Amino acid sequence: MKLLHTSDWHIGQTFFGYDRKEEHLLFFNWLKITIKELSIDVLLIAGDIFDSPNPSAESQRVFYRFLKEITSENPALQIVIIAGNHDSAARLEAPNPLLEEMNIIIRGTVKRDNEGKIDFNHLIVPLVKAGNIEGYCFAIPYLRHGDYPDSENYAQGVKALIDSIYHEVKDNKPIIVMAHLHATGAEISDNDFSERTIIGGIECISPDTFDKPNIIYTALGHLHKAQKVQKENIRYAGSPIPMSFAEINYKQGVWMLEISNQKLEKFERIHFDAPVKLVSIPKEPKELSDVLKEINNLSDGAINSLSPFIEIKVLLKEPEPSLRYKLEEALIGKSIRLASLKAFYTKTENRKELSYEELKTINPIEMAEDIFVRQYGEAMPDKMKNLLSDLMKNLEL
């Protein structure tokens, strides 16, 4: 049995206002070709199908059109999907009665019976080839508080859930755990806000949670960097296209694994060359005159939907109201799209120290917004501003 492990598609994401539909379509076309050429039996999609819990109609069309085409071209293909933290679990599960007819299984929620007991068997998906069960997939969606057995903390709750599911399997066939979570020891970029919106230390799950007989592979989603986590058989697939400039050096692709004689016999990375490149200049912030010289050295050409995105870092001594205009003028005729502009300010020795009374006059929300823009090159999301505002009110500041 051959399987492909992918995750974190984030269909519907916009990149600093730019639509990414064409990038996703090219990835799906590549994925269809890869599945056909490698004679894949099972496709595992480890969450964050959509970028938003309320995806647009067009984003949903892109997703379901892909499912229709891939199953039509590969009638024996089995697809197992779990919801991520960006997905609406209930929305993702809604078409299950129709999709199951196409050999597609989606698990977005943890179901309970009338007595409130978790239905562990619902999260066990038999992996079938030619009518025979070759193994099992534990399809564990992104877990929120209340989705797992009563425990002292989140990590213990997740472990208790996996232990309980494991005990439901009565035969000796190989098991693949697919989950959307943050595993302890996984690498994450310090500057990647797109990954850090949810992730926190309390949610880290030890890789030892998956250390059980018959569990031959753990297919993870949530982090955008493809990587192993402490052990060779615990892997993040990574996102198929970069989600932020912090991911500029990430390598996109999928994991391919082959099960034979109830063992993981083959394991390799299949690389996908992301169609839109990210460019960041200069490597370290420089004064505007130096930045303009680097822009002048960029390739000339027309801009299209697959032109690279550029992030520009400028070192300023004081605010420059016309900065963006000057950079946009310099980019005219260059085959690149301006996505992010980050302004850094030189430190001055004679900067005035504010008194306590002066500090009290500064709006903390505005200060936080300014820091956010400097750090991530984009405006702070309204949701975060509202949460910060609520926190300030609770503290009676």
Image: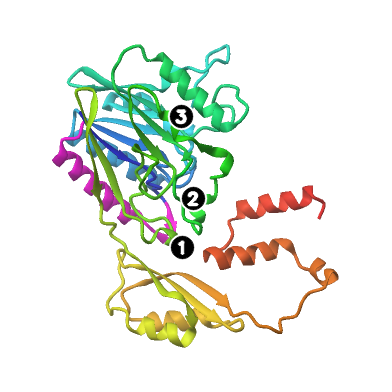
Three-letter residue code for mark 2: Glu
Quarter of image, res 201:
top right
Secondary structure of the residue carrying tag 3 is helix
Q: Are marks 2 and 1 in contact (CB under 8 Å)?
A: no
Mark seen at residue 195 = 2
> 116 left or right of 295?
right
Magenta stretch, overall SS: helix
Q: Alpha-carbon distance for marks 2 and 3? A: 22 Å
| Stretch of the chain drawn in magenta | 13-41
Q: Nearer the viewer, mark 1 or mark 3?
A: 3
Secondary structure of the residue carrying tag 2 is helix
Q: Nearer the viewer, mark 2 or mark 3?
A: 3
Q: Which label's residue is closer to the chain start, 1 or 3? A: 1
Q: Position of residue 219 (x, y in %)?
A: 36, 36
Q: Position of residue 52 (x, y in %)?
A: 48, 46
Residue 17 magenta: yes
Choose between 32 and 351: the one closer to the eye. Answer: 351
> 154 left or right of 180?
right
> 135 left or right of 227?
left
Q: Which label's residue is closer to the chain start, 2 or 3? A: 2
Tell me which colouring the rendered structure shows. Answer: rainbow
Secondary structure of the residue carrying tag 1 is loop
Quarter of image, res 107:
top left
Please say whether residue 181 is visible from this viewpoint. Answer: yes
Q: Residue at x 44, y 35 (%)?
A: 207
Quadrant in which the N terminus is drawn: top left
Residue named by callout 1: 16
Mark seen at residue 229 = none
Three-letter residue code for mark 1: Phe
Q: Alpha-carbon distance for marks 2 and 1? A: 16 Å
Quarter of image, res 62:
top left
Q: Alpha-carbon distance for marks 1 and 3? A: 38 Å
